[in-house]
């Protein structure tokens, strides 16, 4: 039925306008939901966060000065010792007793050595007589040679013979002395072990004021000379060793600041307790270490020195540290006050540089930025971006300049 009145035409026009509006609303591009951040100004730091390990700056191994029987050591790990304090006692071992057969053998050995000594004494007396005869013959030959009854050659021959007899007498003296000492040595073995008082125990004393780090031999028993008994160290002289990749260590310099913590902030029940430290040195030699992925890496040890204690929490943590503890370290290689910062997640490559998507009146605009340094969460950029400027975080590949966006509910 065709409309014949003005009212019918108006209704048709209204329905057509409504239909066009609904279609336009349905086909109009909707704003993309994105996470938003912003440009801010603050302290920028670039650091390396790695696990380190505490170690004693000086470790003292106390060894047994003599062989003997070690008495039980009463000290335990963590005990404090003073310089000069007796920390161990070593009793000399008693001489082993001889059985009947060995005793008879030793007696016969003493008898044989006694006979050798007597023979050496007789040979010494014989050498004395021979030397005296040679001296007399030399005096007679020199007197006759002076009167011309014998030739000078005969006197010279007697003089050489006397020197030979003197050398033979000296050899006899040494043979007699050696035989006498060998006899005395054999006679010592025949003496009973309990013939005299036992030797006093050897006292092992602490070389410095320290704490016991490890007790190597705590039970009573025989020890050899040079065996390690305890390890001592001053727990107040701790340092931290962190291994970095060689390319990371190349950016570290002695004197750079560092922060240390036993637990990560995400693992702690409250705020993480941190200790202040500084880089003391970078070892000159690198070593090879296999990563968790099976890749060989060249690494360098960086040694950190703990700084003076700060608040009560830091003091408590410092006093509880021990040797070979795992500790998280954060070495600051760059720090800039009042730096213009953008979230790292807002950056993306553009041409030969980097860019961000800034939000202006609900639409994104691509802006190039100059990155001066990049950190873990923020990047330090040149002052070309306005403060508080909203930026798109993690921009999707489909995002184009001029596209409408809006903040994702619950996002940044």
Image: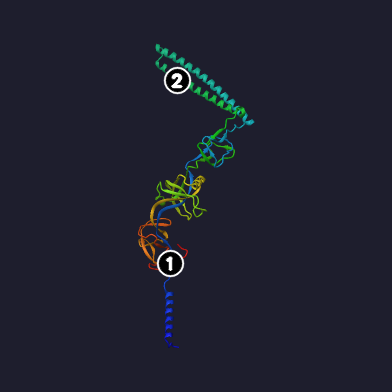
- The residue labelled by disc 2 is 163
Percent across and percent down for residue 107 are 61, 27
Between 118 and 27, the one lying in front of the other is 27
Compared with residue 276, is residue 405 higher up or lower down, i.e. above or below?
A: below
SS of the residue under disc 1: strand
Percent across and percent down for residue 166 are 47, 20
Question: Mark 2 or 1 closer to N-term?
Answer: 2
On residue 54, the disc is none
Between 247 and 146, the one lying in front of the other is 247
Q: How far is mark 2 from mark 1, CA to CA?
A: 121 Å
- The residue labelled by disc 1 is 406
Q: Quadrant of the C terminus?
A: bottom left
Label 1, residues with CA under 10 Å away: few <14, some 14-19, many ≥20: some
Label 2, residues with CA under 10 Å away: few <14, some 14-19, many ≥20: some
Q: Quadrant of residue 214?
A: top right
Percent across and percent down for residue 298 are 43, 51
Q: Is residue 181 left or right of residue 286?
A: right
SS of the residue under disc 2: helix
């Amino acid at each position: 039925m065709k409309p014949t009145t003005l009212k019918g035409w108006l209704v048709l026009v209204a329905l057509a306008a409504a239909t066009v509006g609904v279609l336009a609303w349905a086909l109009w591009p909707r704003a993309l939901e994105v996470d938003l951040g912003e440009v801010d100004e603050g302290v920028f730091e670039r650091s390396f966060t790695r696990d380190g390990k505490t170690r004693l700056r000086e470790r003292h191994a106390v060894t047994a000065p003599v062989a003997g029987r070690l008495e039980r050591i009463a000290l335990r790990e963590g005990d404090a010792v003073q310089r000069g304090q007796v920390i161990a006692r070593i009793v000399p071992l008693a001489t082993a007793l001889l059985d009947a057969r060995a005793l008879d053998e030793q007696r016969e050995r003493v008898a044989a050595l006694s006979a050798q000594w007597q023979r050496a004494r007789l040979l010494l007396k014989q050498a004395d007589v021979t030397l005296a005869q040679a001296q007399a013959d030399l005096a007679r030959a020199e007197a006759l040679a002076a009167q011309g009854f014998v030739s000078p050659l005969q006197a010279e021959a007697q003089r050489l013979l006397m020197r030979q007899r003197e050398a033979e007498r000296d050899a006899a003296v040494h043979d007699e002395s050696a035989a006498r000492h060998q006899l005395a040595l054999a006679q010592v073995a025949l003496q009973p072990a309990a013939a005299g008082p036992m030797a006093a125990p050897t006292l092992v004393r602490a070389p410095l004021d320290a704490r016991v780090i490890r007790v190597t031999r705590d039970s009573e028993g025989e020890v050899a000379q040079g065996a390690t008994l305890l390890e001592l160290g001053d727990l107040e002289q701790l340092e931290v060793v962190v291994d970095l990749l060689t390319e990371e260590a190349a950016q570290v310099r002695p004197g750079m600041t560092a922060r240390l913590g036993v637990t990560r902030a995400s693992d702690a029940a409250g705020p993480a307790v941190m200790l202040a430290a500084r880089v003391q040195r970078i070892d000159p030699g690198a070593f090879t270490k296999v990563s968790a992925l099976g890749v060989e890496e060249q690494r360098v040890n960086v040694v950190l020195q703990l700084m003076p204690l700060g608040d009560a929490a830091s003091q408590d943590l410092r006093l509880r540290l021990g040797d070979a503890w795992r500790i998280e370290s954060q070495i600051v290689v760059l720090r800039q006050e009042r730096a213009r910062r953008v979230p790292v997640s807002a950056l993306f490559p553009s041409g030969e540089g980097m860019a961000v998507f800034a939000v202006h009146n609900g639409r994104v605009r691509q802006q190039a930025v100059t990155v001066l340094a990049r950190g873990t969460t923020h990047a330090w950029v040149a002052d070309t971006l306005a403060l508080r400027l909203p930026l798109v975080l993690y921009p999707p590949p489909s995002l184009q300049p001029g596209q409408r966006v809006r903040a994702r509910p619950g996002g940044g």
